[in-house]
Image (tube, rainbow, N blue to C red):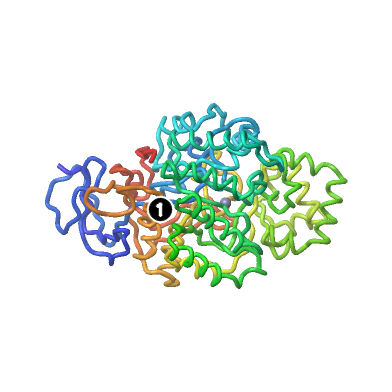
Amino acid sequence: MLDILIQNGVVTDGTGKQAFRADVAITAGRIAVVARDIQQEAKRTIEAQGLHVAPGFIDPHTHSDLTLLVDPRAESKIRQGVTTEVIGNCGFSPAPLLGAAMEEVRDETKRLGLNVTWTSMTEYLEHLRQPGTAVNVVPLVGHNIVRGAVLGFDDVQPTPEQQADMERLVADALEQGARGLSSGLFYPPGFYAWTEEVIELARVAARYGGIYASHIRNETNRLLEAVAEAIEIGKRAETQVEISHVKLEGYRNWEGVDRLLAMLEDADSQGVRVGCDQYPYTAGASWLAYILPYWAQAGGTKAVAERLRDPEVRARLTKDWEENRAEWEDRGGMRDWTDLLITDCAPRPKVQGKNIADIAADEGKDPLEAVFDLIVVSEGQVECVCFGQLEENVRALMRHPLVVVGSDGDALAPHGVLAQGKPHPRSYGTFPRVLGRYVREERVLSLEEAVKKMTSVTAERFGLTDRGVIREGAWADLVLFDAQTVADKATYTDPHQYPVGISEVIVNGVVVVDQGQHTGALPGQLL
Ligand SMILES: [Zn+2]
């Protein structure tokens, strides 16, 4: 007796091979048979006439580390067809939490109503295991958190002993279940680190077969240098490199897409294992403080807010803004203040969904003063999106075989504490947006290519065996969608909206989304 029989669907198997009509049978969490007209009896039959049956989507770049603890149902992800999330990205992992790293995370958890009751990766993962999660989880350990734990968030370099301490923390995390190292060299304290420090840590990850994923040092005027650094780290640490949320940010840099792709191809042809992920939007999202010069970002989130209370610091920053405007625009990626939209600022909900120019006009102040005030009033916990990219570049990157789909979003929900603010719509819309807008409407990719970029390529990069493909023996992570109607609904002003056209999602052989509704099942595994 089969557990589940999916009948009459069009199988898009994740390999890029042309979609074909077949039934898919599931037993004991795995795909048992893929064939036409399977006649065996099943406990549950799902009629998939008119639907595509694809491997569950693998999201290689998420920040769901804490939100999965708030709501393990992973609503905004599972409803996109995502069955596996890679967490701990951009250098910020949920463990190990020691010293200043603990303080940094504690502020963020407060906003989510969580108590930090763990320090090690083992302890954190235990919180995921109990009660379980709807999606499979692949954890990474973050360089920024490891550096914060050993050195704090200041502009300092490690002694040999401190470097050894960081290496030990990375090794411990890998031993306890992390699948690689992430870095956030664009964020404090990652941006203080020299390349050698990161290479040594990536080597430790590589010893355990771990990947190196990076929010690279610069995505604007020094993008190519930053890509070169990532490639060098991968080459010298002898590991797979994942360049996170690849983009050309800032209007002065929009013309560099061919050079960027040539550089990646070059590295690839030299045998460096390098890949990228991308979200299908022209806006990025970040903490508002990221637009400040590095010296002003030192010391951790709270320290940044505290610093901005000082009128002398504000005067120094204002002078710097006037004299080095291009540098600010490059760091921020914005052309003017209308490009920066506040998405989350709990103490001032009125500003959510408004851009800095409008907020400043409403409050009758200079835009830079408005920025400083928002950071101060929120103690640094203020987030924004920035419209800094060119649509044609989004398409050009998407078409490239080295680029896969990844959300850079969190598992959220349109209810409860996860419905706060107006977060970037990518948390709800990434995968259906590629299938609807870029496959069906604009034909940037074929459906088979798009699904491949959401499944098997990513699985291979992260070393996830028996995932990301539909074949006999593989884990039964599956999504059923209607290629004619699948679409994202989330927008910048109204982001908490599920996509449409995705009817069933199965994780490890258990139905989690059934006719568009979450069943409450939590069959995800730690991979
Ligand atoms: Zn990032």
Q: Between 114 and 365, which is closer to the camera in this rendering? A: 114
Residue, x 66% and y 43% (percent of image)? Answer: 189
Residue, x 63% and y 30% (percent of image)? Answer: 99
Q: How many marks?
A: 1
Q: Residue type at mark 1?
A: Arg
Based on the displayed image, in which of its 4 quarters is residue 521 positioned? top left
204 over 436 or under it: above or below: above
Q: Position of residue 18 (x, y in %)?
A: 28, 67
Asked if ligand 1 lies within 8 A of label 1, the reply is no
Based on the displayed image, in which of its 4 quarters is residue 440 positioned? bottom left
Q: Is residue 290 visible?
A: yes
Q: Position of residue 34 (x, y in %)?
A: 20, 55
Question: Which residue is outermost to the top?
Answer: 117
Q: Between 236 and 106, which is closer to the camera in this rendering? A: 236
Q: Position of residue 178 (x, y in %)?
A: 45, 39
Q: Position of residue 441 (x, y in %)?
A: 43, 71
Q: Is residue 414 visible?
A: no
Q: Between 166 and 357, which is closer to the camera in this rendering? A: 166
Quadrant where the N terminus is found in the figure: top left
Provide the residue designation for mark 1: 461
Left or right, 42 with respect to 336, comes to left
